[in-house]
Image (cartoon, rainbow, N blue to C red):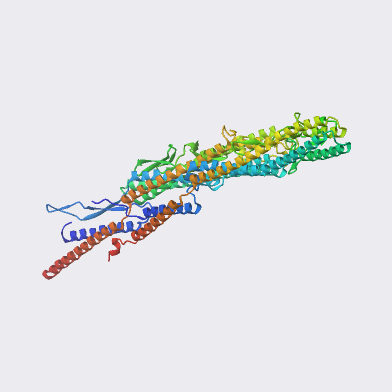
């Protein structure tokens, strides 16, 4: 369309385009603090020219679909770091509690009751017929047994908490994968009609990021806006518009819940994310610590019992077990208790006479003997303390480094996708100017049209 | 085109604040507890060493307590033997007097009575107790070790045993803490109580007094030989006490090296982290309150 009316049409198109551009700018400004929002870029394009009398005239401007500015590869890197952060967070959350239980630097842990027990025997050897010292050995033994029991109970309780946490994580994962599958459908629908996934993609990225915090995830761009998600070991989580829920089943042998995907137990293959950390704590770290505490309790109880049987009580009778004999290594710490309550039954004597302290000495010397897996109780326990400290220290360092990488990646992501208020203000002013100019064009054309109409009236 | 930077400084600022707060918290904890290692993960190797350190310190304390208890017991035994030596010396003098041959029968009887008194005194000392336990009964400490019994050789019966107790006086050393009474008072190489009985009989019958005195002298030297054990043990206890006290100081020094704080550097860290935190808070305030272009649009 040429002529004045054509110009009017072009100016009206500009008004529409700039109004739309200002709307997009306004939306960007509105979402300046929205987590995961990627700024939208205004896409203006000139309309195809029209031919009037052998001449080509431009036909104004159109507002094309917007483009969300994002870097999907960078997003995937952020997600990967989130997996590590989630795993380390869950791991440290539990292990810091273990550390508090065994914090020898502040005097908590097994060293104090262990030493007190052996010291009570050393003290008894000073005066083996003293019933209060005999009573002291039983009390120190009870304190030691109680410390073992409490530590074992605390570790099992942490394991149970990790188990409950893992079930909750699976439930959250299923909620997220359902939402992601629904967004896949919406995005592929939009892409199919030539639109940008825009804010739906932002939402999906946010959800995938949350999912990565819960479980290690591999992402595959399946085309048409669909994102396929699997666990790092290949178990499907989301394919197109379909999500595959994980499930948990009680494992009677461990009394904990295993994680299943499509009927397959994938528990041992899960890495990354909170769930990965919870499973690591529940199935590896705490069992390892618990096993060492049990080995210590079992080695100690067995050695003390063997030596007790080699001695005589204050009545001259052969010594009996001091601790209840552990039924198995695996339950030693949780079930250890002092088997005798009569102080006279403490087998301090080595020759059957009440004044003999030989067996009390021998019992006290167990602390210097390799009775726990070929090591002295102190050496064995010292190694456990080192292991706990070292595992936490390594995880702390890793967490710090993951945090720094996350920060850098988020900065890079912000540089690409973040909304800059200055940038939006500049754009707003630009659209305002264009809008004002077009409005002026409308005014001028309106005047010209009125002039033209008045000529027509005069001549008519 | 210029490089686009992240338009949102808030996350970086928050991270910086958290980091400085963490440093400040760590420095505060170090200053308040006096230790740079407050959890196992702060220094796993030092934390493990602290276990051994505490055990060592605790063993030292226990051994010191044992030594303290034991010293009294050994001193009591040594003191009893000292009295035995004095009494036996007196008996020998009386025996020598009795062996003179110039005494009247009445005087001889009087000496015999005196020696009997000395024997009873020595018998009583041989049955000395400490905290209710017989000191010279071997390990049969609840049984009175010596009773007079004419049917037994030397007229004395030993009801104790010949066992010996030993006690740890440091992590590496232990010492024997008793000599069986039979070895001191009724030793086959010199039976003190038996020889006293022999002297009494000799004095009463005025026969073989000289030989009885000689036998008593042999038994006496046996007692003094055995008594040396107690003196030596007491010396060993004193030496061990010195060693343990030195070791305790070393253990404390070592613990300080392992997990003790350098207060000067901890205080400096606290001051530095506080300054850094104030700076980042001030910077955050300035950055976040900076106007943007939209503020200038009218």
Q: Residue at x 18, y 56 (%)?
A: A1
Q: Is residue A6 visible?
A: yes
Return the residue nearer the eye: B32 or B236: B236
Task: Find residue A34 and report its horizontal and vertical position in percent.
Answer: 38, 55
Left or right, A51 with reference to A415 = left
A56 shown above or below A349: below
- In front here: B130 or A50? B130
Residue B169 is left or right of residue B127, and the answer is left
Residue in the foreground of this view, choosing between A175 and A271: A271
Q: Quadrant of the C terminus of chain A?
A: bottom left
Q: Residue at x 31, y 51 (%)?
A: A415
Residue A367 picture quarter: top right
Q: Position of residue A348 (x, y in %)?
A: 70, 37
Q: Residue furthest bottom?
A: A458
Q: Is residue A6 left or right of residue B16?
A: left
Q: Nearer the viewer, residue A344 or B257?
A: B257
Residue A245 visible in image: no
x then y, percent, for residue A257: 54, 41
């Amino acid at each position: 369309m040429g002529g004045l009316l054509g110009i009017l049409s072009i100016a009206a198109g500009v008004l529409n385009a700039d109004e739309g551009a200002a709307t997009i700018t306004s939306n960007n400004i509105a979402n300046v603090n929205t987590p995961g929002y990627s700024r939208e870029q205004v896409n203006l394009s000139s309309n195809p020219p029209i031919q009037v009398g052998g001449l080509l005239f431009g036909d104004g401007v159109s507002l094309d679909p917007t483009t969300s500015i994002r870097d999907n590869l960078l997003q995937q890197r952020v997600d990967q770091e989130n997996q590590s952060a989630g795993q380390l967070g869950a791991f440290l959350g539990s292990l810091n509690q273990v550390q508090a239980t065994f914090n020898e630097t502040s005097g908590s842990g097994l060293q104090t009751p262990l030493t007190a027990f052996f010291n009570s025997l050393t003290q008894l050897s000073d005066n083996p017929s003293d019933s209060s010292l005999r009573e002291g050995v039983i009390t120190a033994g009870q304190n030691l047994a109680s410390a073992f029991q409490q530590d074992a109970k605390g570790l099992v309780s942490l394991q149970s908490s990790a188990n409950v946490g893992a079930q909750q994580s699976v439930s959250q994962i299923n909620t997220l994968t359902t939402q992601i599958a629904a967004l896949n459908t919406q995005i592929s629908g939009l892409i199919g009609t030539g639109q940008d996934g825009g804010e739906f993609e932002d939402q999906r990225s946010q959800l995938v990021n949350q999912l990565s915090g819960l479980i290690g995830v591999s992402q595959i761009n399946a085309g048409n806006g669909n994102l396929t998600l699997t666990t790092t070991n290949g178990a499907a989580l989301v394919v197109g518009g379909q999500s595959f829920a994980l499930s948990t089943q009680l494992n009677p042998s461990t009394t904990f819940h295993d994680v299943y995907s499509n009927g397959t137990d994938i528990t041992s293959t899960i890495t990354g994310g909170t769930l990965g950390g919870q499973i690591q704590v529940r199935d590896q770290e705490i069992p390892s610590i618990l096993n060492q505490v049990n080995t210590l309790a079992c080695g100690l109880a067995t050695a003390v019992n063997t030596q007790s049987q080699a001695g005589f009580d204050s009545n001259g009778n052969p010594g009996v077990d001091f601790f209840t004999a552990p039924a198995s290594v695996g339950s030693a710490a949780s079930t250890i208790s002092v088997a005798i309550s009569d102080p006279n039954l403490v087998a301090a004597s080595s020759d059957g006479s009440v004044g003999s302290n030989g067996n009390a000495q021998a019992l006290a010397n167990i602390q210097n003997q390799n009775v726990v897996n070929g090591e002295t109780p102190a050496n064995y326990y010292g190694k456990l303390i080192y292991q706990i400290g070292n595992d936490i220290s390594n995880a702390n360092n890793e967490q710090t480094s993951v945090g720094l990488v996350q920060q850098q990646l988020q900065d890079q992501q912000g540089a690409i996708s973040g909304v800059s208020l200055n940038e939006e203000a500049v754009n707003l002013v630009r659209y305002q100017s264009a809008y004002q100019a077009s409005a002026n064009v409308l005014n001028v054309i309106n005047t010209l049209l009125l002039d033209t109409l008045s000529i027509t009236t005069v001549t008519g | 085109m210029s490089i686009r930077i992240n338009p949102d400084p808030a996350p970086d600022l928050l991270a910086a604040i958290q980091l400085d707060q963490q440093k400040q918290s760590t420095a505060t904890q170090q200053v308040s507890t006096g230790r740079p290692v407050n959890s196992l993960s702060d220094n796993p190797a030092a934390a493990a060493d602290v276990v051994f350190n505490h055990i060592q310190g605790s063993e030292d304390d226990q051994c010191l307590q044992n030594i303290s208890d034991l010293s009294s017991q050994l001193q009591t035994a040594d003191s009893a033997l000292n009295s035995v030596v004095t009494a036996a010396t007196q008996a020998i003098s009386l025996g020598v007097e009795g062996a003179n041959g110039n005494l009247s029968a009445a005087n001889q009887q009087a000496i015999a009575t005196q020696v009997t008194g000395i024997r009873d005194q020595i018998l009583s000392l041989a049955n000395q107790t400490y905290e209710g336990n017989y000191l010279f009964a071997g390990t049969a400490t609840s049984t009175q070790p010596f009773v007079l019994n004419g049917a037994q050789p030397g007229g004395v019966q030993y009801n104790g045993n010949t066992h010996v107790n030993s006690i740890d006086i440091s992590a590496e050393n232990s010492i024997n803490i008793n000599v069986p009474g039979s070895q001191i008072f009724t030793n086959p190489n010199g039976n003190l109580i038996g020889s006293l009985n022999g002297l009494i009989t000799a004095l009463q019958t005025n026969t073989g007094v000289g030989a009885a005195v000689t036998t008593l002298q042999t038994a006496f030297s046996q007692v003094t030989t055995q008594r040396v054990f107690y003196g030596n043990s007491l010396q060993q206890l004193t030496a061990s006490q010195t060693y343990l006290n030195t070791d305790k100081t070393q253990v404390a020094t070592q613990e300080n090296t392992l997990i003790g704080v350098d207060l000067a550097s901890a205080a400096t860290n606290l001051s530095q982290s506080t300054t850094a935190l104030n700076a980042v808070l001030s910077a955050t305030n300035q950055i976040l309150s900076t106007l943007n272009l939209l503020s200038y649009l009218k």
